[in-house]
Amino acid sequence: MASAPRFAAYQRLPGLVLGFHGCEKETAERLLRGEVKHLKQSQNKYDWLGNGIYFWENDPLRAWEFAQERHALAEGQQGRIEEPFVIGAVLDPGYCLNLMDRRALAELAVAHDELVSMYAKTGKPLPQNRGRDFGARFLDRAVVEMLHAVRAELDAMGDEPVPPFDSMRSAFPEGDFLYEGSGFQAKNHIQIAIRNPDCIKGYFRPIQD
């Protein structure tokens, strides 16, 4: 059987995307006033798509729900949002590890094998995804970061350029099923994690009508 073509040129997503981020109102206002350049990159051990600035793709309501969920946390709890707000951003995903793309999924599977091999040498157990809908994705985050590390190592070897990904994108099933026998869940969404801040072309205050 002939080897599959790479189709590498199509890993750059064309066009602009609107992303929405739930956060503190003061954080959003500082961005809109130009006092800070970008949102802070998330680097939690359980982040679904690894390190990056996270956005809900074209879904301001889901961003608002997320901010409200964080507002409902107990006083003093890590991640609590005092005054929920949604900020929008114009995104150019650029060179994107799009996990709704066959090539990206294959590369992620290889990264998992590398992670398994690395942990086997140390004798430590692999991280595990936890919680409902795997809300805390310790394993997936580790695999994603392994993928980026492997690419950086291959690029440093210099045989051929292996550019870093600017962003990551994936659909996630989440929440209760909409109705009996349904394949749809109430909080299904698409997330984008921006690794290269140059992909963010500007922030805006969403229209709430």
Image: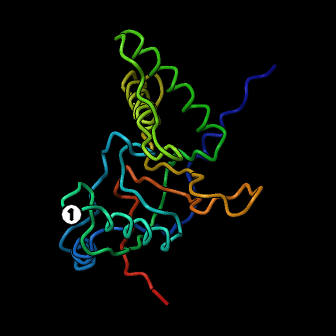
Q: Is residue 153 above or below residue 85?
A: above
The image quadrant that residue 204 belongs to is: bottom left
The quadrant in which the N terminus is found is: top right
The image shows residue 45 at horizontal and vertical percentages of: 33, 39
- Residue at the spot 74% in from the left edge and 57% down from the top edge: 182
- Residue at the spot 42% in from the left edge and 23% down from the top edge: 126
Local SS, label 1: loop
Q: Amino acid under label 1?
A: Glu
The image quadrant that residue 163 belongs to is: top left
The image shows residue 62 at horizontal and vertical percentages of: 49, 68
Q: Is residue 175 or residue 35 the one in the foreground?
A: 175
Looking at this view, name the residue that lies furthest to the right.
1
Report the number of numbered marks: 1
The image shows residue 70 at horizontal and vertical percentages of: 33, 63
Disc 1 crowd rating (10 Å Cα; few below 14, some 14-19, many 20+) is few
The image shows residue 38 at horizontal and vertical percentages of: 28, 63
Q: Is residue 95 or residue 167 the one in the foreground?
A: 167
The reply, left or right, for residue 86 in relation to residue 112 is: left
Q: Is residue 124 above or below residue 39?
A: above
- Residue at the spot 43% in from the left edge and 61% down from the top edge: 55
The reply, left or right, for residue 143 in relation to residue 172 is: left
Please say which color scheme the image uses: rainbow
Q: Is residue 176 or residue 208 the one in the foreground?
A: 176
- Residue at the spot 60% in from the left edge and 36% down from the top edge: 105
Circle 1 residue: 75
Q: Is residue 15 or residue 21 the one in the foreground?
A: 21
